[in-house]
Image (spheres, helix red, strand yellow):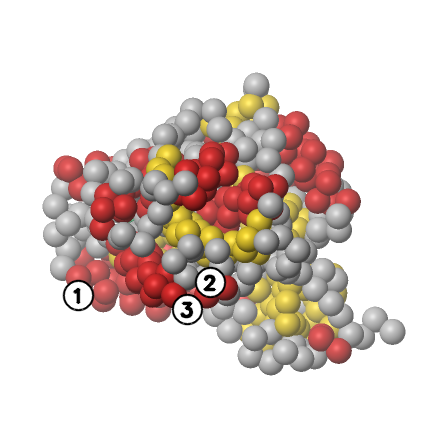
């Protein structure tokens, strides 16, 4: 979820090098932000166990790959990486290879059978047991722990933050999901929903603020159902905002059926709660939404969008769309395009439906939209999304925006990339000469593409 959030699929986690420790671990992360947050917990646990870290798998004594199972393609990538790790292991026989995360949970010991290079398997609720599992492998047997828990929130485990710039941090405020959306594997890989104790979240936020972090993103599959001893999401947001008044607070993901006006009101009240809402719609046809088991209609969804714009006039709204779900007709699909026009999303993350074994949809419906039709619909979603984003971004040309700088631009390191308070990506020309990641600049927007704003900040001196 690039927030807006960065939903970076297939990127490697940054790792820190702590050369004193005798054993070096390498962690590679795929999937959603929650998986990235989990890798930081795992790094914290390993560091505590005495491991150092390397950014090169070829130098590692322990390779952990934190996996995603959301679509078939995500898993194919992991198989490919396992083949590569297997080639490393040929010249480093003592190397331990472990698979963590959602694919580990989905495939369980089948992974051991199909990939002999794998020594260790740990699901999302099993990371506390990693030190014992590693010891078991060292003593000569393969190790597997994939029990899901109803309580585990890792509230007491200190993550090792892997971001090199130390500007932004993620905090998982809950785990699991109770919404059986028919296409989705997450309830099977992450288990029942549970909320982390609000006190421990507020404490972590306050300590990140003290360490100088400028932006914190609170994570959950459905933040609107956060509930810890009667503290609901709106109240949690208020407590977090007050605990770190100078830190920009973001969150994801909101669910259209559960998002309360109280949350929107709270965001409007606190100057550090960012008006960024990621509200996945998935489809615009009520018939498809019903089959997806999403619990709302297109009209309900659009009324939620209206509420957001009413409470938060500067809101940036993004969404997720699945094309080619079971039984989706051309007419159904056109309703998705229609809804996109009505909602005027700032950005859209679009996916072709990928059947996941064991889900409700896989059991009940046939994956009957041909791949070429899925592809064509995906392209139409992309084209329309770009057209709308470009129009919306162009409206900001000539305005001044506060921008939190994240990093030098990859395309031209003289420029820096950051985000506006509501979450739009901005390239600030020439900023590397006088600013650093973490600085907030006032930027005059001079140009826009569908994905980014472009502008200049006057030199502070
Ligand atoms: N909790 C979030 C989403 C988690 S998964 C929510 O409720 O929206 C992220 C996105 O992946 C989903 O929003 C959906 O658009 C997409 N997705 C999930 N399962 C999928 C599947 N089987 N095929 C294609 N896309 C899928
Ligand atoms: Fe999956 Fe639905 Fe839960 Fe999101 S809300 S994680 S799409 S089951
Ligand atoms: Fe996230 Fe992928 Fe699991 S999206 S919850 S890592 S299936």
Return the residue nearer the eye: 122 or 249: 122
Find the distance from the CA under tag 3 to the CA under tag 1: 23 Å
163 sits left or right of 245 in the view = left
The residue positioned farthest toward the right in the image shown: 461
Mark 2: few, some, or many residues within 10 Å (few <14, many ≥20)?
many
Badge 1 or badge 2: first in the primary sequence: 2
Indicate whether 254 appears above or below 30. above
126 sits left or right of 285 in the view = right
Q: Which residue is mark 2?
A: 57
The residue positioned farthest toward the top in the image shown: 229
User: At 17% from the left edge and 65% from the top edge, which residue is drawn?
Assistant: 372
Q: Which residue is mark 3?
A: 387
Could you say whether the residue bearing mark 3 is in a helix, strand or loop?
helix
The x, y position of residue 63, in whole percent, is 44, 54
Return the residue nearer the eye: 173 or 22: 22
Mark 3: few, some, or many residues within 10 Å (few <14, many ≥20)?
some
Label 3 CB less than 8 angstroms from ligand 1: no
Mark 1: few, some, or many residues within 10 Å (few <14, many ≥20)?
few
């Amino acid at each position: 979820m690039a927030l807006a959030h960065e939903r970076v699929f297939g990127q490697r986690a940054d790792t820190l090098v702590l050369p004193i420790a005798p054993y070096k671990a390498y962690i590679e992360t795929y999937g959603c932000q929650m998986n990235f947050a989990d890798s930081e917990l795992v790094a914290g646990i390993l560091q505590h166990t005495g491991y150092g870290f390397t950014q090169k798998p070829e130098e590692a004594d322990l390779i952990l790959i934190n996996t995603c199972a959301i679509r078939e393609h995500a898993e194919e990538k992991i198989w490919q990486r396992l083949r590569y790790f297997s080639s490393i292991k040929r010249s480093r026989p003592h190397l331990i290879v472990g698979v963590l995360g959602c694919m580990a949970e989905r495939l369980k010991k089948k992974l051991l059978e199909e990939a002999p290079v794998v020594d260790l398997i740990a699901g999302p609720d099993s990371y506390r047991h990693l030190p014992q599992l590693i010891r078991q492998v060292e003593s000569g047997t393969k190790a597997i722990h994939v029990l899901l828990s109803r309580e585990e929130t890792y509230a007491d485990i200190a993550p090792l933050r892997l971001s090199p710039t130390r500007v932004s941090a993620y905090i998982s405020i809950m785990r699991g999901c109770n919404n059986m959306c028919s296409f989705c594997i997450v309830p099977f890989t992450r288990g029942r929903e549970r909320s982390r104790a609000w006190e421990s979240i507020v404490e972590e936020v306050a300590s990140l603020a003290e360490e100088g972090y400028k932006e914190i993103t609170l994570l959950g599959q459905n933040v609107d159902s956060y509930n810890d001893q009667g503290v609901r999401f709106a109240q949690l947001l208020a407590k977090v905002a007050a605990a770190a008044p100078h830190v920009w607070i973001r969150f994801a993901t909101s669910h259209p059926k559960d998002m309360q006006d109280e949350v929107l009101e709270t965001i409007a009240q606190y100057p550090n709660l960012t008006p960024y809402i990621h509200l996945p719609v998935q489809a615009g046809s009520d018939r498809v939404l019903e089959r997806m088991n999403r619990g709302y209609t297109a009209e309900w969804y659009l009324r939620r969008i209206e509420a957001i714009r009413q409470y938060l006039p500067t809101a940036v709204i993004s969404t997720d769309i699945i094309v080619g779900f079971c039984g989706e007709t051309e007419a159904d699909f056109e309703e998705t395009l229609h809804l996109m026009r009505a909602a005027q999303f700032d950005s859209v993350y679009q996916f072709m439906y990928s059947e996941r074994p064991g889900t409700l949809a896989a059991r009940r419906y046939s994956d009957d939209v041909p791949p070429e039709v899925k592809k064509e619909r995906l392209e139409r979603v992309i084209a329309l999304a770009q057209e709308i984003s470009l129009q919306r971004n162009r409206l900001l040309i000539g305005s001044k925006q506060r921008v939190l700088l994240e990093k030098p631009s990859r395309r031209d390191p003289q420029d820096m990339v950051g985000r506006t308070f509501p979450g739009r990506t901005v390239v600030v020309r020439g900023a590397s000469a006088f600013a650093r990641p973490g600085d907030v600049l006032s930027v005059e927007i001079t140009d826009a593409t569908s994905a980014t704003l472009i502008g200049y900040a006057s030199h502070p001196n």
